[in-house]
Amino acid sequence: MSKKNAPTSPPLTSADYLKKILTARVYDVASESVLETASILSARLNNTVLLKREDQQPVHSFKLRGAYNKMAHLSPSQLKKGVICASAGNHAQGVALSAQRLGIRAVIVMPVTTPLVKIDAVSALGGEVVLFGDSYSDAHSHAVELEKQEGLCFVHPFDDPDVIAGQGTIAMELLRQHQGRLDAVFVAIGGGGLIAGMASYIKALRPEIKVIGVQMNDSDTFAQSAAAGCRVTLPDVGLFSDGTAVKQVGAETFRVAQPLIDAYVRVDTDSVCAAIKDIFVDTRSIVEPAGALAVAAIKQYVATHKTSGQTYAAILSGANMNFDRLRFVAERAEVGEDREALFAVTLPEERGSFRRFCELLGNLPGFAAKATAAITTTNLPSGKSPRSVTEFNYRVSDAHLAHVFVGLTTSARGESTKIAAHLGKHGFKALDLSHDDLAKEHIRHMVGGHSVLAQDERLLRFVFPERPGALLKFLSLMRPGWNISLFHYRNQGADYGRILVGLQVPKSEDREFADFLSTLGYPYVEETANPVYRLFLQS
């Protein structure tokens, strides 16, 4: 019979996948990951949150389970020739480690844009790295060519029955580790291999447990495909959660998982950053964005459905975080948790308005739980804590109106709208920027510039103690005739806040200004002669 007319194998059934999961070979390389309770997050949500710690695997990701299971089922002749894959991340390391354990050749095609740390990680595991193209698609196409040229076996990152079965062993462990009440399991979706394997096992043994698929709102190809009833290809995907940034799900993963998934939750970048912080608070571990998707979804699910007393499991799928991303994550985590609100506030450009505005902040509705920032207020009603200013950016630019960028701590969702209304009621027009990506990503760093109004300006860098009243002490000791022409502050979570201030001080009052600095007692450095200041800020 010719190959063209050879019968195709029938699709694998649920029973087939259950058998493949139960007989999967993963523990030569993988360990049974810990299932632990996120006690702090559980108490806050009033629901039990369980964390399945796949971030603790040898390559800090679940990916080696499927990769090894696929490779362990290859024939001796296939193993002798070696394997190949295309990946810029966790799958590459999983294949490399699996090949090392099996003693076979592994060629890993990675885009030329892959960070050096990931290239070095694969090389250290014995993988032969081939850099090709600017994207995963380019790398994948080249890997397919090399597969044919050199007779290598291609190890797909998700769309393969043995890979799916390998990932399904996570569910096998989970149900064995927790045999009590379990209302839902939240699983991040990229290509669909993880959720296809886990859903197959969970629904076969405990169909009452909900399987919730989680995707980024800018990479939700599986959810869109489920709604359309067929696989949808996205024209573009967001790259923040690079581990789930897939334009089209696998044909087999979609066939297997789509009927078994109970619901989908889409999360955004800020909520994922907040989830990374939540996981760190409970575990002192930092997961990658894809690894935090499930926790972000649990928080959103609880808020939406108002649940209480239920038990949810989240798969922490990986922890291969680029160190350079941590600054961005920390910046966005507070907004993602609604612990920080951002505003553009308009003040009258007149003496004392800045101080009046700072005093007003202490009387805003819904006080923050802690008062640690340098820019806070005092003399508040009994039993109420001052609200911390997390950021304050201002540059004089208009003779009549001042426009400032302000960040404030919040203690509950929805406070930003109430704060904006309260500020407006007291004469300070406020635009709520808490959910404005342009403001959060760019504008907050661009407030400033040259100003013809900043005459006789002295520029100083201060170190303020992060305690209530530090700024008001500064303002109260200033002479009434001096004007603040520039102010930049961002809380960095330290005991001291670093603040840049521009003050308009007539040269005839240099002695009085020196006395002011001495009385203030805050460490400072004068930067008036700094060439960077002259280039970018001084008119």
Image (cartoon, rainbow, N blue to C red):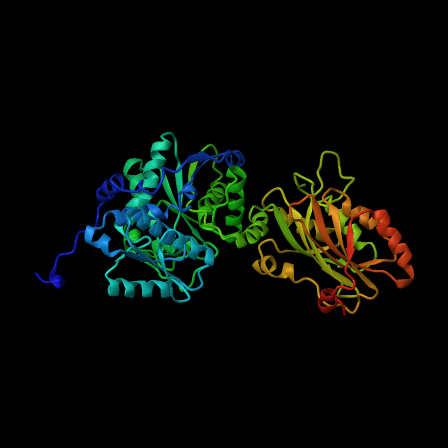
Please name the residue shown 56% across and 58% down the image: 437
Residue 402 visible in rendering: yes
Which residue is more in the foreground, 143 or 370?
143
In this rendering, would 176 be left or right of 519? Answer: left
Question: Camera-side residue: 316 or 71?
Answer: 71
Q: Quadrant of the C terminus?
A: bottom right
Which residue is located at x 89 percent, y 52 percent?
A: 515
Locate residue 345, reporting x and y percent. 70, 56
Q: Picture coordinates of residue 499 (x, y %)?
A: 73, 53
Q: Residue at x 86, y 51 (%)?
A: 516
Quarter of the picture containing the N terminus is bottom left
Q: Nearer the viewer, residue 43 or 356?
A: 43
Whether residue 480 can be seen here = no
Please identify the residue farthest to the left as the structure is shown: 1
Which residue is rendered at x = 19% and y = 54% of the image? 77
For this view, does 301 lie left or right of residue 361?
Answer: left
Residue 70: x and y, percent? 27, 49
